[in-house]
């Protein structure tokens, strides 16, 4: 389905470029109308991260929702998974997170959650898109039926209690020195507090948002500052969240980065040993390393692959009954606890394994050696370079050369005019040659 507004994770773009007050108003009206089901008083919860444009979008969405008769509960800066959790626990009809996730402050976005805390299906997003391009005047509420808006206090405490309950009551983080990097984002208050309550010695960085510094040289997409701080403070572990805290990357005591694939391996093996895997398998995306797949196979754990995007991971988990899934980027979904990726809860599961094994993080979180993986992007202006005969021929030739000893993935980005070319295999030189050959073909096709 070709979509005008929604990408793989809500609506995202340049603030005051694509994401304007007018669009935010319309999204509020359209989503509000789609989720008005029944005669009860409808309500929506709205959370946001710390970027400057959040104020503009928040108030525009309030205007949109109230104009179609929905009451609005404003949560303020809070992680995306907290919005999903509170949507369900506060019995709201809809949840909204205003965030562009790991992007820099210039961008912003709108993520929507249904009444059970799950991201919307393609069909529901299509309904909202249709309304966005239609006149909505005749759907506006009567004067006496307009919605109200109010701020809700205590939401941080609710999320802290929720996160703590994902660990056994007797488990403490006493004795662990933890550096937490909140990316100057939505988790800057709540996560350091939760770690402290669990008994950790907490060193917090990326907790001074100013509206402009979210994800800037910090957080899960730039873990260098965290690595440096871990070594400097001789900490046991570093935790890096992104701007809305739905993904996590760890750093071991040596300052080495631990990606989402290794986290999946740690949690999967631990849960299998404890009998907590709903089925002997997990769900990952086409981007997960072949090394993870081979490791899990050796543990008697299967792996189902989906397209890129945590929503597709979750869809497959729900469809087939798995309770663990994720992406190399650190989107880890633990469906026993959460309805979306939760970076902090995923980190807590790994910390539990560290405390149980009483071994350094560098040992606990190195379950397999990843195969060499090469990822390159080819930008284009228009057209469909992937349909070019020369590109198709290069892909077929690449598959033939890898000959079952690696993987090749060529796909269009869901958020920008870019073709992503990923290859992996046992022979790094061969993988590089195959990827470069396809990139050259794409470059010629894009210039044609």
Image (spheres, rainbow, N blue to C red):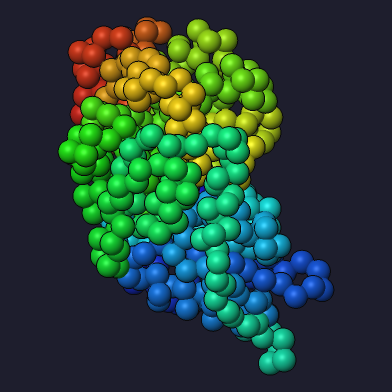
In the foreground, 281 or 439: 281
Quarter of the figure with the C terminus: top left
Is 373 drawn above or below residue 198 in the view shown? above
Q: At which x and y percent is residue 84? A: 58, 54
Quick one: 66 or 189, which is closer to the camera?
Answer: 189
Q: Quadrant of residue 365?
A: top left
* Relative to 355, residue 179 above or below: below
Q: As drawn, which residue projects farthest toward the bottom?
A: 143
Q: Left of 286 or right of it: where is 44?
A: right
In the rendered structure, the answer to whether residue 346 lies left or right of residue 137 reads left
| Residue 18 on image: x %, y % | 37, 66
Q: Residue at x 47, y 16 (%)?
A: 293
Q: Residue furthest right?
A: 39
Determine the residue positioned at 60% across, 44% down: 165
Residue closest to the eye, 387 or 283: 283
Can residue 407 be seen from the camera position used here?
no
Give the image quarter of residue 208: bottom left
Which picture quadrant has residue 43?
Answer: bottom right
Task: Please state the horizontal and vertical placement of residue 192, each as a whole percent of the image.
Answer: 39, 51
Q: Is residue 260 above or below residue 116?
A: above
Circle count: 0
In the image, is 164 to the left or to the right of 15? right
Could you say where residue 225 lies in the image, as x and y percent from the top left?
20, 44
Q: Is residue 195 visible?
A: yes
The residue positioned 34% from the left and 46% from the top of the image is 202
Please give the name of the residue rendered at 55% of the width and 46% of the height, measured from the top-left corner: 163
């Amino acid at each position: 389905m070709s979509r005008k507004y929604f990408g793989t994770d809500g609506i995202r773009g340049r603030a005051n470029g694509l994401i304007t007050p007018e669009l935010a108003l319309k999204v509020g009206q359209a989503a509000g109308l789609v989720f008005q089901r029944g005669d009860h008083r409808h309500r929506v919860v709205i959370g946001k991260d710390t970027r400057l444009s959040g104020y503009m979008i928040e108030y525009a969405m309030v205007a949109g929702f109230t104009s179609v008769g929905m009451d609005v509960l404003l949560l303020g800066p809070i992680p995306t998974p907290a919005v999903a959790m509170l949507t369900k626990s506060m019995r709201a009809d809809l949840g909204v997170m205003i965030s562009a996730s790991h992007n820099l402050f210039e961008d912003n976005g709108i993520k929507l959650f249904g009444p059970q805390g799950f991201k919307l299906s393609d069909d529901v997003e299509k309904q909202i898109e249709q309304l966005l391009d239609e006149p909505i005047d005749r759907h506006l509420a009567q004067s006496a039926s307009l919605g109200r808006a109010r701020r809700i206090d205590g939401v941080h405490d609710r999320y802290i209690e929720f996160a703590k309950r994902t660990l056994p009551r007797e488990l403490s983080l006493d004795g662990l020195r933890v550096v937490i990097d909140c990316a100057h984002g939505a988790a800057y208050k709540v996560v350091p507090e939760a770690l402290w309550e669990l008994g950790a010695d907490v060193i917090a960085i990326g907790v001074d948002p100013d509206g402009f510094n979210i994800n800037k040289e910090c957080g899960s997409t730039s873990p260098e500052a965290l690595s440096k701080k871990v070594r400097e403070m001789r900490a046991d572990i570093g935790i890096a969240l992104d701007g809305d805290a739905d993904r996590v990357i760890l750093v071991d005591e040596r300052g080495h980065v631990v990606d989402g694939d290794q986290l999946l391996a740690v949690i999967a093996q631990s849960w299998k040993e404890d009998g907590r895997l709903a089925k002997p398998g997990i769900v990952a995306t086409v981007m997960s390393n072949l090394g993870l797949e081979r490791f899990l196979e050796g543990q008697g754990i299967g792996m189902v692959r989906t397209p890129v995007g945590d929503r597709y991971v979750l869809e497959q988990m729900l469809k087939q009954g798995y309770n663990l899934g994720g992406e190399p980027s650190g989107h880890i979904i633990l469906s026993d606890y959460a309805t979306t990726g939760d970076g902090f809860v995923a980190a807590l599961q790994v910390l539990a394994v560290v405390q149980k094994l009483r071994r350094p993080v560098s040992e606990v979180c190195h379950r397999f050696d990843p195969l060499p993986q090469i990822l390159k992007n080819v930008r284009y202006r228009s057209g469909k370079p992937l349909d070019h005969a020369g590109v198709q021929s290069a892909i077929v030739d690449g598959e033939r050369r890898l000959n079952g000893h690696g993987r090749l993935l060529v796909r269009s980005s869901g958020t920008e005019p870019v073709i992503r070319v990923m290859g992996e295999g046992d022979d790094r030189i061969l993988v590089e040659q195959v990827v470069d050959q396809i990139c050259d073909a794409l470059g010629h096709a894009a210039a044609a």
